[in-house]
Image (cartoon, rainbow, N blue to C red):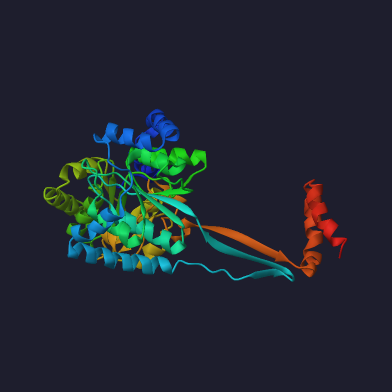
Amino acid sequence: MKKLLYPETIVWSELAKRPVKDLQELEPTIRSIFKLVQEQGDEALYQLAEKYDGKRPDALLATPEELAAAENEVSAELKAAILQAYSNIQLFHLQQAEQMPVVETMPGVNCWRKSVAIEKVGLYIPGGTAPLFSTLLMLGIPAKIAGCKQIVLCTPPSKEGTIHPAIRYTAALLGIETIVKAGGAQAVAAMAFGTESVPAVSKIFGPGNQYVTMAKQMVTQLGVAIDMPAGPSEVLVMADETADPAFVAADLLSQAEHGPDSQVVLLSTSETIVDQVIAEIEKQLQELPREAVAAQALDNSMAIVLEDAQQMLDYSNLYAPEHLILAIKDLQTIANGVVNAGSVFLGNYTPEAAGDYASGTNHTLPTNGYARAYSGVSLDSFVKKITFQHITTEGLQNIGRTIEVMAEAEGLQAHKNAVSIRLKKL
């Protein structure tokens, strides 16, 4: 982990750049996968599973019996944890429901907006070295609350052709019935185009490897929406002399273990704190099963000593982190100044892992600086906002001349006539 002391603000933009790979080189391979899935449907998914996973699955869809079996394959302790997380996530997302009143903008002119669920959504859930059943909760719960009529879940099976029991248990808990044993770009293609077994969806959610990331970006050019542009996971921690170095090190490592291309950043006003955190990282790293992965991520990472809390805030807002942890004294003042971040964690006893699993907020968040313009997944991600209006005869008399003048000024005579022809009848 590189240590930088008081860098000039002129170089901050360069420091804030992520070590992101150019995914364009993957495009030809993904286009060929898209073409195969479009032409051969289910058979393409079988062939690609055999090619990339080394085994042709017996069936593409998980059976009700497989889902039911998960009840006995997941420990009682894990089931209790999943249920608690489910409860917290559901409670938080239920509060996001919006009911807008009818607004009379002028007498006789009534306007309102209604949230309508996206009918068909697809959820991609990684199932390899880290089967992310927590992400299934984060995506499946708001999809259910929104009222999406069809939810398609794609997740790569093991070499034995099975889906991780915790993913099956969580899917059953959510009432998701269409569970496809497919991963990679071919899973994205199946959800985008549809096959004999996989319904086509209107929007695709979920994280994945570089092929999944690129495939999601490519389907947006073909009329299918995605949750957001996504990249490697990241965290930025602000720490001053009130921070616990062991806590900070643990938070940094919790993101570093996601993948070798993850990035973690430490900002501090104290070189002593930075040195203590780095020492703790070296100590804790040796105890991690994913030590090699985390070590590679640390090579992409940095600790920066800055002059004061305001500089830390300014750098953080420039960086726009996916996760932001404030392990500092003046929490509320700095928190109020945050304008670019996916999710913020306040205080020494608020680990980022709480948001990843069970506190209630969503962990599907913008990375790679996209927090400057994107929000994380929420209930809004699964609905469309449709506006309605109803104009009475009184309303048209009140607003009609305004429309006629504006339409005429733009040279759009038919627009003006659509109002004038009605006014003449009144």
Q: Nearer the viewer, residue 366 or 86?
A: 86
Q: Residue at x 43, y 64 (%)?
A: 145
Q: Residue at x 51, y 67 (%)?
A: 98
- Quadrant (top left/top right/bottom left/bottom right) for the N terminus: top left
Q: Residue at x 78, y 53 (%)?
A: 406
> Residue 252 in the image: x percent, y percent?
24, 52
| Residue 194 location, quadrant | top left
- Quadrant (top left/top right/bottom left/bottom right) for the C terminus: bottom right
Q: In this view of the protein, can residue 170 be seen by the observer? A: yes
| Residue 65 location, quadrant | bottom left
> Residue 288 in the image: x percent, y percent?
14, 49
| Residue 143 location, quadrant | bottom left
**Which residue extends farthest right?**
424
Q: Residue at x 82, y 48 (%)?
A: 413
Numbered circles on residues, count: 0
Q: Nearer the viewer, residue 113 or 375?
A: 113
Q: Nearer the viewer, residue 339 or 113?
A: 113
> Residue 89 in the image: x percent, y percent?
35, 65
**Left or right: where does residue 285 sit relative to residue 358?**
left
> Residue 301 in the image: x percent, y percent?
26, 44
Q: In this view of the protein, can residue 324 be seen by the observer? A: no
